[in-house]
Image (cartoon, helix red, strand yellow):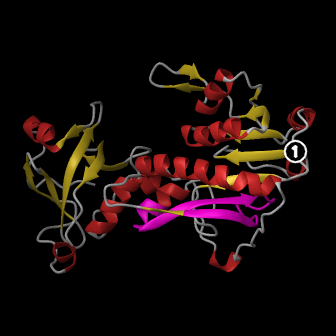
């Protein structure tokens, strides 16, 4: 069994390791090109490339997988199966037609919910109690292929998109471990998706990162944890970006039963316990903030700076 694995971020590494442990022959890895990282813009390999090189697996890094030379390089590997996980490029029909067992994708949602590039962000931002992983056959549409297997993963109040990336990465790898023998043996019974139930999760835009303080406190709380650790929710303070990394979950009674005493976005109090701010339906306590040009700090550190005072309007 000759397998090509396609993936890019840390999310995909556990699935690659499962393939290596399963006894199949991983004949190649396809990942995104090296990119500059950090303030010094150091050219850095993807986590999947770094893992592949540790095991001596050939790595392909096409800028565009659709190009003829990229497709031919993939054909030369003669894969029986292609497995993808957060690769970052849409596979053309020419690529999908290469392996005799098809192409499967490990997608971080319970399809047909959250098709697209940011399924974990939206699950947390929308306040879902449960998300999961679906392994599906790949088709020409965006995450439209028939579903092979799936597993549910709860989203706790303490979770952020970052913690859910870790949980779903491990869940996806375990699901692949369980699904692969059935797939190779030809025993899977794939189920078509119901397109009428499809929900899409496009990549997060800069506009979505800006907090609207007129929204309910619970909505803002979900947004903050849904954008942590990347790209981060923010507001404006004296015209500069103020990142909000964490806040306390608002109590339902506080958030829904009384109107804001001041305009939404108004700072009510600044203390070691947090920055209290008016929202569309009550107070929200910000507990981790990052002013422009500085590192993230907890509320106590921020309060001791003494620059933000009650009555200030953010946004």
Is residue 176 positioned above or below 258 on the image?
A: above
Q: Nearer the viewer, residue 151 or 194?
A: 151
Q: Is residue 265 above or below residue 22?
A: below
In percent of width and height, residue 84 lies at 71, 46
Residue at image point 13% right, 44% down: 308
Residue 266, percent from left and from top: 16, 59
Q: Which residue is located at x 54 percent, y 47 percent?
A: 169
The residue tagged with tag 1: helix, strand or loop? loop
Identify residue for label 1: 80
Q: How many circles with numbers are drawn on the protein?
A: 1
Residue 157 magenta: no
Residue 29 location (% of width, % of height): 74, 33
135 in magenta: yes
137 sits left or right of 97 in the view: left
Side of 273 where 129 appears, left or right: right
Quadrant of image for the N terminus? top right
Highlighted range, magenta: 123-151
Q: In the rendered view, does 304 fall on the left or right side of 28?
A: left
**Horizontally, is 140 left or right of 256 in the view?**
right
């Amino acid at each position: 069994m000759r397998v090509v694995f396609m993936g890019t971020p840390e999310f995909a590494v556990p699935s690659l390791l499962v393939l290596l442990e399963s006894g199949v022959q991983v004949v190649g890895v396809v990942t995104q090109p090296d990119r500059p990282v950090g303030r010094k813009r150091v050219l850095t390999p993807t986590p999947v490339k770094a893992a592949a090189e540790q095991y001596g697996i050939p790595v392909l890094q096409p800028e565009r997988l659709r190009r003829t030379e990229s497709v031919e390089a993939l054909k030369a590997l003669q894969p029986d199966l292609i497995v993808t996980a957060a690769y970052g490029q849409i596979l053309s029909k020419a690529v999908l037609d290469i392996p005799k067992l098809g192409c499967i994708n490990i997608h971080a949602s319970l399809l047909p919910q959250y098709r697209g590039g940011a399924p974990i962000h939206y699950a947390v931002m929308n306040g879902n109690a449960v998300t999961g992983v679906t392994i599906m056959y790949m088709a020409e549409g965006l995450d439209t292929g028939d579903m092979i297997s799936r597993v549910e993963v709860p989203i706790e109040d303490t979770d952020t998109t970052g913690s859910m990336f870790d949980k779903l990465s491990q869940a996806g790898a375990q699901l692949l471990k369980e699904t692969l023998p059935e797939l190779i043996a030809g025993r899977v019974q794939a189920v078509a998706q119901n397109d009428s139930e499809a929900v899409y999760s496009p990549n997060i835009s800069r506009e979505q990162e800006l907090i609207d303080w007129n929204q309910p406190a619970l909505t803002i709380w979900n947004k903050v944890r849904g954008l942590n650790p990347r790209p981060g929710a923010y507001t404006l303070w004296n015209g500069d970006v103020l990142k909000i990394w964490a806040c306390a979950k608002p109590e339902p009674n506080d958030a829904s039963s009384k109107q804001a005493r001041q305009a939404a976005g108004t700072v009510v109090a600044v203390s070691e316990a947090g920055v209290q701010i008016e929202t569309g339906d009550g107070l929200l306590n910000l507990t981790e903030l990052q002013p422009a040009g500085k590192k993230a700090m907890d509320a106590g550190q921020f309060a001791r700076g003494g620059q933000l005072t009650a009555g200030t309007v953010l946004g």
